[in-house]
Every structure is written in C-alpha cells, then in structure tokens.
C-alpha cells in the first residue's frame, strides 16, 4: 500500500468519524434525559402530564427537524446543515443548563430536538455519499456505533454526577449546577461533544455528490481523488453523469414513480420496523422491565448499563462484516435472532421464571441481534437506495418514519407494561419485528459493493423486468 493510499484512507476515516459525531450527540441527548426526569420533576413540582411533556417535547422538535432537513440539505448542502445541527445541540445544552424556568427548559429541549432530527438524517446521508462503495457499509455503521457510545456515556455521566451531588463547589452558580440541581450538569455536559462536533465540521468538505448535483465537477473531483484516487474519481463522475445527466435538484414526487416504488416501501418500512421491534422500550424502560423481573433498583440500573455496553460491542460486528457478508445476511440473522429472543422473554415472564439471570440474558441477546443488524444496517440501506437528485428529501421521509414509530413505542410501552403485562408486551414486539424478515426476502436487494449510481440503475432494470414479465 502506498503512502498516498494511506493518506487517502486516513482522510476518509477522519471525515466519516466527524460526521458520525452527529450520531453520538443523537444518542447522548436522547438517553441523558433518563437520569434527569425525577430531579426536574422534584425541582419544578411537575404533575404527571408536565413530566411526560418534559420527556417527549424533544420529539416534537425531532419530527420538525427531520421534516425540514431533506429540503434544506438538498438546497444548501449537507455540510452547512450538519453545522446547523451542531449549533442547535450546543444552544440546547447551554440553555438547558442555565434555564431559569420550566418553560425556558422546554424551549431549549425543543431546540435540542431540532438538532437530533436534523443530525439523524443528514449525518448518515453525508457518510453514504462520501464513502467509496466498498467501504460504505462500514463507514455508515460508524454513525450507529457513535449513537450507541453516546447512550452509554450518558448513562455513566448521569451516574457519576448523581453520586457527587453532595460535593462542595466554588461559586453559587457552580454549586447550583453541580450540586443542588445536578440535572443542569447532566444536560449541560452535552456542550463538550457539541462544541467538538461544531469545530470539526469546519474542517470537512462538502459531499462530492451534492457538488456534482450543483454542477461543481472540479471541486467534487478534487475531493473524490483525495478519498479514493484519480481512477476511482473518474469512474464515479462518469457513472454519475450516466444516471443523472445533470438533472440537478429534483422534486420528491420522483420517488413515487413506479420505478422507485420498491425503494420507497423499503425506505418507509425498514426504519419503522426497526423501532416497533421494541429497542427503545428496552433501552429507556430497561430498569422498569428488569424490576418486573425481580431485580432490585440498583441491579436494574446496572443491567441497563450492561445493555448499553452490549449495544456498543455488537455494533462492531456490523462494522467489520456489513461490507463482507452483505446487508441481507445480517438482517436475516439479526432480525431472526431478535424475534426468537423476544418470544422467549415473553414466555419466561408468562411462566413466572423471573428469578436468576435468564430474563437479562435474553434481553442482552435481543440487544446484540439488533446491534449488528437493524441498528446499523437500516441506516446503511436507506442511505444508498434512493437516487442522487432526491436522496436528501427521500432520506428525510424515511427518517420521519423512524421517528413516528419511536413516538408510538415511547408512548405505548408504559401502558402496555401496566395493562397487558411484560409477557404480552414482548410478544407484541416480536410480532411487530417479524415482517422485517419478509421485507428483506422480498424487497431489499443486496447492495454490497455497488456504487450509488449502480443501485439507481438496478431499480430501473428491475422495473423493466417486472414490466416484461
């Protein structure tokens, strides 16, 4: 391997890691709320409805952020919208830490939700357009890895700050933030990764495919050469021209044409199914579920940290195999394992086998299966199945599907656990998860090693074959 190649590879990894920090902030900001709910409720004397509003208000921002991110990223570029998401994260963290009223706190949580919504779409979009086809699965999986690391670090930071609330600090404001109202420090700690993300983004280039859509071929070629060498850059540009013919920005109605119907169904269903399988129910309501299984509160919280660590570790399986084994094998193996684990967990609850480690073992099996399949592969697939000219808008639509499912799971899980019990809840998650096996078998093509332009060509050829049949 030549020195130039090494430099090119390092550049690719560093740029994709910077973009993946959007996933870290997504995971951190989403999960950090779990440690603050009781403290905020006490300090502001919240009733049940206001407590729920504090937890779920960011979701409103997420949905709006996703809704605007596609159009904005197609019009102004991926990089500038990533910078916008970093600014929103930073403003939210600082504002939540210093807010003087509950209303102010809600406003800054909404701003943070906007940042989450924007980053959850644009970060994997940017990586999928930036990485060469042979590394694309691995690079996009870094986004999911960063997300899981953000979740785990939020658990640890919450635990550390909660255990040091009695410590004495210098000034009155410091004492308030880190001592008497430690939830401020929990939320404010996000300023560190948000600041790093913001500064790092000024050092990364624009997406070369977005530049090609804008007719800026020379700049795009310069970036592509730095990523993968001159020969590869020429091939990428030639393939782009052959499929796009300089169409520039297109309308989303292009996606509803019969030729892209399968891509549309995949983009809507795969993200939706990845959430209704119950992953966030396990992550966010883990302590409650484990307490119902007979664990004490302390051991349940320890189990939640273990869940987070397993989530991180098994994401590495996807990183190292998604470009070797392919997307479909990982989905078949992971989704099948997740369905089996959910069915067994439900059976254990139904049979009253809650003592011992069995419930936790199969919850960890479910998390492991999700972590190397649904979690990262969903982002990989939706980042590569749409045509260049509308990829931003189409990915926004797919990510919106994910957030809608996330909302329903978050709202319904406590009710299901209370009214239906743990066994029926997990069986329902298994039923909701299983259609992903059919989706993978019938609709999702194997995209390993294919360029984005080649995938676009595949849809057109597949449609022609269907018409002739």
Image (cartoon, rainbow, N blue to C red):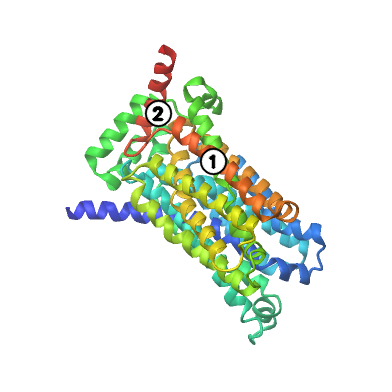
Visible residue check, residue 7: yes
At which x and y percent is residue 36? 67, 67
> 404 or 309: which is nearer to us?
309
Q: Measuring 41% from the left and 12% from the top, which residue is drawn there? A: 468
> 346 or 37: which is nearer to us?
346
At which x and y percent is residue 93? 62, 63
Q: Considering only vertical position in the picture, is 105 above or below 217?
A: below
With 140 as the anchor, is 86 left or right in this view? right
- Quadrant (top left/top right/bottom left/bottom right) for the C terminus: top left
Disc nearest the viewer among 1 and 2: 1
Mark 1 crowd level (few <14, some 14–19, many ≥20, 10 Å Cα): some
Reading the image, the residue beneath label 1 is 434
Reading the image, the residue beneath label 2 is 456
Q: Secondary structure at mark 2?
A: helix
Query: For residue 201, what is the image quadrant?
Result: bottom left
At which x and y percent is residue 229? 24, 44
Q: Residue furthest front?
A: 351
Report the Cα–Cα distance between label 1 and label 2.
Answer: 28 Å
> 430 or 104: which is nearer to us?
430
Query: For residue 381, what is the image quadrant?
Result: top left
Circle on res. 321: none
At which x and y percent is residue 59? 66, 50
Q: Considering only vertical position in the picture, is 315 above or below 447?
A: below
All told, the count of numbered labels is 2
Q: Secondary structure at mark 1?
A: loop
Q: Residue furthest left?
A: 2
Q: Measuring 67% from the left and 54% from the top, which residue is drawn there? A: 58
With 266 as the anchor, is 224 left or right in this view? left
Mark 2 crowd level (few <14, some 14–19, many ≥20, 10 Å Cα): many
- First along the sequence among labels 1 and 2: 1
Q: Residue furthest top?
A: 468
Q: Measuring 27% from the left and 45% from the top, which residue is drawn there? A: 228
């Amino acid at each position: 391997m030549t020195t130039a190649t090494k430099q090119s590879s390092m550049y690719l990894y560093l740029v994709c890691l910077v973009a993946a920090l959007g996933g870290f902030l997504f995971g951190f900001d989403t999960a950090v709320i779990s440690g603050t709910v009781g403290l905020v409720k006490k300090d502001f004397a919240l009733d049940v409805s206001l407590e729920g509003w504090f937890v779920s208000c960011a979701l409103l921002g997420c949905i709006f952020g996703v809704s605007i991110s596609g159009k904005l990223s197609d019009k102004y570029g991926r990089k500038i919208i990533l910078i916008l998401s970093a600014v929103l994260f930073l403003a939210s963290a600082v504002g939540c830490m210093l807010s003087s009223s509950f209303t102010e706190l809600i406003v800054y949580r909404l701003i943070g939700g906007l940042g989450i919504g924007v980053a959850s779409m644009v970060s994997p979009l940017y990586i999928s357009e930036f990485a060469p086809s042979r590394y694309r699965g691995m690079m996009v999986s870094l986004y999911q890895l960063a997300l899981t690391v953000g979740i785990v670090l939020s658990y640890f930071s919450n635990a550390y700050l909660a255990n040091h609330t009695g410590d004495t600090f210098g000034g009155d404001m410091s004492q308030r933030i880190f001592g008497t109202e430690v939830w401020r420090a929990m939320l404010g700690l996000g300023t560190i990764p948000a600041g790093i993300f913001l500064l790092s983004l000024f050092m990364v280039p624009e997406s070369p495919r977005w530049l090609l859509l804008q007719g800026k071929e020379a700049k795009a070629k310069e970036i592509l050469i730095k990523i993968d060498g001159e020969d590869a850059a020429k091939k990428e540009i030639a393939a782009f021209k052959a499929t796009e013919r300089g169409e520039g920005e297109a309308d989303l109605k292009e996606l509803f044409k019969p030729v892209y119907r399968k891509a549309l169904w995949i983009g809507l269903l795969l993200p939706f199914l990845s959430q209704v399988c119950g992953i966030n129910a396990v992550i966010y309501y883990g302590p409650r579920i484990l307490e119902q299984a007979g664990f004490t509160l302390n051991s349940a919280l320890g189990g939640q940290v273990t869940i987070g660590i397993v989530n991180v570790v098994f994401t590495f399986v996807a990183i190292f195999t998604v470009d070797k084994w392919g997307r479909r094998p990982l989905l078949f193996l992971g989704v099948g394992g997740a369905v089996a684990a959910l069915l067994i967990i439900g059976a254990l609850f139904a049979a009253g086998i809650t003592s011992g480690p069995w419930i936790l073992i199969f919850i960890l099996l479910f998390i492991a299966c999700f972590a190397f399949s649904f979690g990262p592969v969903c982002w990989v697939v939706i980042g590569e199945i749409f045509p260049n000219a509308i990829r931003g808008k189409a990915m926004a639509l797919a990510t919106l599907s994910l957030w809608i499912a996330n909302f329903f799971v978050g709202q319904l899980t406590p009710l299901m656990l209370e009214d239906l019990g743990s066994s029926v809840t997990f069986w329902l998650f298994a039923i909701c998860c299983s259609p992903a096996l059919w989706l993978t078998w019938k609709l999702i093509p194997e995209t390993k090693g294919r360029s984005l332009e080649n995938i676009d060509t595949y849809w057109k050829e597949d449609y022609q074959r269907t018409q002739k049949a």
